Amino acid sequence: MTVIAETRACGVSLKPLSRFGSQRWNTLARSQSLFSQWEWLEAYQQQSGRPQSAIILDEAIGPEAAILCAGSTAGDRYDLSRLFGPDLGVADGEPQLILGGTSGYRGGVLLPPTPSRRLAAALAIGAAVEEVAREQAVAGWGMLYLDRATAAELAVHLDHGVARLLQAPGAVVDVEWESFDEYVATRPKSRRTNIVRDLRRTTEAGVAVTVETPRPSLIAEAAPLLSALQRRHGHPSTPDGAGRYLTSFSSGPLERHAVFFVARLRGQVIAFAFAIAFDGTLYVRSAGFDDALARQTAAYFTTCYYEPIRYAVANGLHTIDLGPSAYEAKLLRGARLAPRWALVQARPGRSSTFVDREWNALQRAYWLDLEQHYGSGRRSPDWSDIAPSC
């Protein structure tokens, strides 16, 4: 059962999240991404088999603020030393407190909308995080994958020694077109030529592209492709495990939001992308493809980029969240980078030579160079350093 650390005057205690219920939780998460919603968290718990925790400030009128939290184990992709290097002062595999959520590489802190209450809640969340970190005697803690506004808002209330660090950004498409043809027409000439060529290759190869709702037979065809892709990227995976993943996130309350973009050649699925449409955004969550056939026919680009754009335009969605990785392909097809930030602190007393300003300068130079070379000229203003707390 999912538990929470509930802050009260007497300290921190553990309570079941079910006490709050989906409606009350989603009221708190109303302005957050898909990955902070009750439906997603329930599916994540079902798929992973691991209960999640959250620090929740609970007043008599209802939850006031919350932040998800989870431990990090040796070899975990969210281990702070792996994310930021050994100079941080946290050794690989040491007990850590990872906060803000990691699904979709999107973190979040649930705060009330009223400015005065938001200020008080942010202050209390910061104090609660530091209290939980002390009680659990962790080597360090990190709030990961935050947008800049949230990170800046929280940093003001945290210890001066908390590092404010740039992380790998997301890739986002702003859907501004009335039709897919308009999207193609507004691309720079060389990129427009590549898109037209991709689409022609898919058609001339006889690939049938469809938009489908989830069903067991489709998942059975898609799962081996997802599993193979995960293994190519060094992640342990089996077709059965990939099938459970796709089923968990495309069934129950999420089923009506789930959509598959599927490419078939002579009746065989050679590429697919799985997405969830929620609150005006299409979240492209995972993909799989036959490496040779999908690239030969451009079915990879069709299912992962062109069909999601076509779908978003047709359904009045305003944003496509493509997630991190494969940045060149995403930028070339109209995405922009969305900076993500982390607030990180090693255990007090640890010797650390880590300097966030130097880290951020290197990260910023790399990502801005990538965006300049492959992007469409639109740049997020959120790359500047977050000022230290007073």
Image (spheres, rainbow, N blue to C red):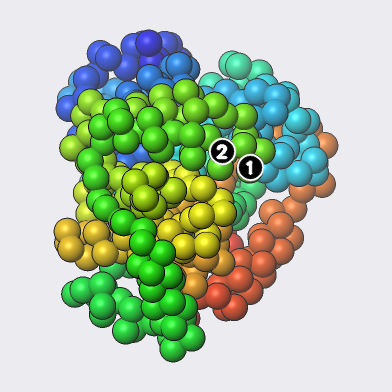
Query: Residue at 44% of width from left, 48% of height from top?
Result: 270
Q: Is residue 30 visible?
A: no
The spot of residue 150 in percent (x, y) is 42, 50
Name the residue that disc number 2 marks.
Answer: 228
How packed mark 1 is, by other alpha carbons closer than 10 Å (few <14, some 14-19, many 20 or more), is few
The residue type indicated by label 1 comes to Arg
The residue type indicated by label 2 comes to Ala
The spot of residue 301 in percent (x, y) is 44, 62
How packed mark 2 is, by other alpha carbons closer than 10 Å (few <14, some 14-19, many 20 or more), is many
Is residue 138 or residue 202 the one in the foreground?
A: 202
- Name the element at disc 2: helix
Work out how far the residue at label 2 is from the one at label 1, CA to CA, in angstroms: 6 Å
**Quick check: marks 2 and 1 in contact, CB under 8 Å?**
yes
User: Quick check: 64 left or right of 200?
Assistant: left
Query: Residue at 41% of width from left, 82% of height from top?
Result: 192
Is residue 317 or residue 261 the one in the foreground?
A: 261
Query: Residue at 70% of width from left, 35% of height from top?
Result: 346
The spot of residue 339 in percent (x, y) is 51, 59
Is residue 65 or residue 82 the one in the foreground?
A: 82
Is residue 145 or residue 50 the one in the foreground?
A: 50
Question: Looking at the rendering, which quadrant does residue 109 occupy?
Answer: top left
Question: Looking at the rendering, which quadrant does residue 195 occupy?
Answer: bottom left
